[in-house]
Image (cartoon, grey):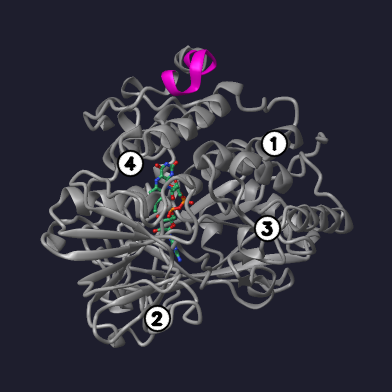
Amino acid sequence: MTTGAKRSRRVAVIGAGAAGLVAARELRSEGHVVTVLEQSGGVGGVWRFDARTEADALGLDEHRPHKARVHSSMYKHLRTNLPREIMSYSDFPFDSAVLGPRYSGDRRRFCSHQEVLGYLEAFADFYQLKPLVRYHTRVLAVEPVAAAEPASAAGSSGATTGSEADANKKEEEEEEVVWSVTSERLASNGRASTSSAGGSADGDIGRDSGSLAQEREMYDAVVVCNGHYAEPRLPDPDQVRGLLPPGHFPGQQLHSHNYREPAQWAGKTVLVVGASNSGEDVSRELSAGGAARVLLAARSWKNEAWGADAAPYGPANNIYRYPMVSELHADGSVTFEGGRREGPIDAIIWCTGYKYSFPFLRGAAADVAAVSDNCVGSPLWLHMMPPGPLAPGLSFIGLPWKIVPFPQMELQSKLIARLLSGRVPLPAENAMRADVAAHLQAMREQGLPTRYMHMQGMDQFAYNDMLAAMCGPDVPPLPAWREVLYRATSALKRSRPEDYRDGDIAEAGGPEAARAVQESEA
Ligand code: FAD
């Protein structure tokens, strides 16, 4: 349901990745005043390949300082695991004609990370989003405060016209919650700059500084788009004995967050743990890159024909599948579930996923979005906002996984923009809680544990349709060809796991997929 009423809000978007960019576009087109706070020097988020890796190679210290962190988890030769047609936002096709000068020269359907960054850059250029982004600005704290607290520190006030400021002031008086956002200005080397370093090209940073160039501003809403592929997740140490302390096992250990290319493991025996996209890719890269042997361990195989004793495979025919690892030993060997022991192992690369992390949330915001067992909140309504008084002022984009992210982020952004403007009314708190309860009940009925709370898989399509319907009649559902190509890609991965990226989707998905390819080009 939509209403005629519309109000403009001052909105802080945290992060200028795929989520933050489309959020900025949708919020601005709904009439909001948008500031995107981005810690790096450019847009694109995780697609900005960074050759550096972290010294804490397993990411054991969640509180490691910012300067010890690297955001991107991309590896050097990564190609997308989805066809570019379906990765695109709904109205900005992912083809070289659209990319113009941002085209990387890679026409492949499953393209390189450089091409995806080019796409996001082209999107930001075309919609003139970059002027909304404040680069080298890291958000340190986000907290709801009573509206009565004076917003004199509001950096955003400088971005509004006099009449906007008047309108916003009136709205602030009506609202119960405003958002305090504290950020620090980073030098281009990623370190926090001191106030003695002065302001910046942006002019207004640092005026509210203490010893560091920190600034506190007030916003009407905060949209969190900080990504969830930067904080490594390891198995529970109870499930893998000897995992901690890391020095117990003498071989090298790292998380896939810190894997870039295979060269250093040539001639070595490497255990790769986890067989999702990263585990499958990394094991094949190691095999092609000259590793002596690659052991690929996983809790469950998608294809039961691949048992632990199945023949080796891979570019050098030296990848061996194993069950999940259960113990690391001080002599450099490892034991797998079922009792088989192998060694010595030179290195272990943990491709075991990532944690949601919102280190900047404070007070009630931290409470409603606490992360436990891979679940944000208890959980968030529609994976986006906490039911209760902090909605719609606090929202999250891009939490679901096993999905096609960009177009879903676009629909989430459209809905958040409309909830903030009042064009779409926010449901009553008890209705939001009932939705959450229904989601939990559906998970229980399917026997899914909490850690799959934000996992969607094929459910993403019904979710996307629901978001579009909630937005109103001017937001059509995503066209059916996207789902057809997603299914065809899954079929291709199953039939040609080793080289699906160079396979033919139309062949794998049959005539329906062939039609979908044509429709995607129309
Ligand atoms: P990010 O891209 O991570 O952007 C978050 C931004 O927030 C970053 O720019 C970061 O610097 C900024 N930020 C974080 N914290 C702060 C802070 N405190 N203050 C200020 N700024 C902050 N998706 C696909 O569609 N196809 C694929 O083939 C594919 N392959 C992938 C392969 C790998 C190895 C990984 C890790 C992911 C892959 N993805 C893929 C998923 C990818 O993460 C999403 O496509 C999408 O890019 C996520 O966008 P985001 O904006 O949510 O997060």
Residue at horizontal 18 percent and vertical 56 percent from the top: 262
What is the number of the mark on residue 335?
none
Amino acid carrying label 4: it is: Leu
Label 4: few (<14), some (14–19) or many (≥20) C-alpha neighbours in 10 Å: many
The image quarter containing residue 121 is: top left
User: How far is disc 2 from disc 1 in space, using C-alphas?
Assistant: 38 Å
Q: Is there a contact, CB below 8 Å, between mark 2 and mark 3?
A: no
Q: Mark 3 points at which residue?
A: 448
Which quarter of the rendering shows the N terminus?
top right
Q: Is residue 366 above or below residue 400?
A: below
Q: Does the magenta segment cover residue 509?
A: yes
Residue 344 at least partly seen:
yes
Indicate the position of residue 473 as horizontal and vertical percent values.
Answer: 75, 25
The residue pinned by badge 1 equals 462
| Magenta-colored span | 507-514
User: Which residue corresponds to mark 4?
Assistant: 117
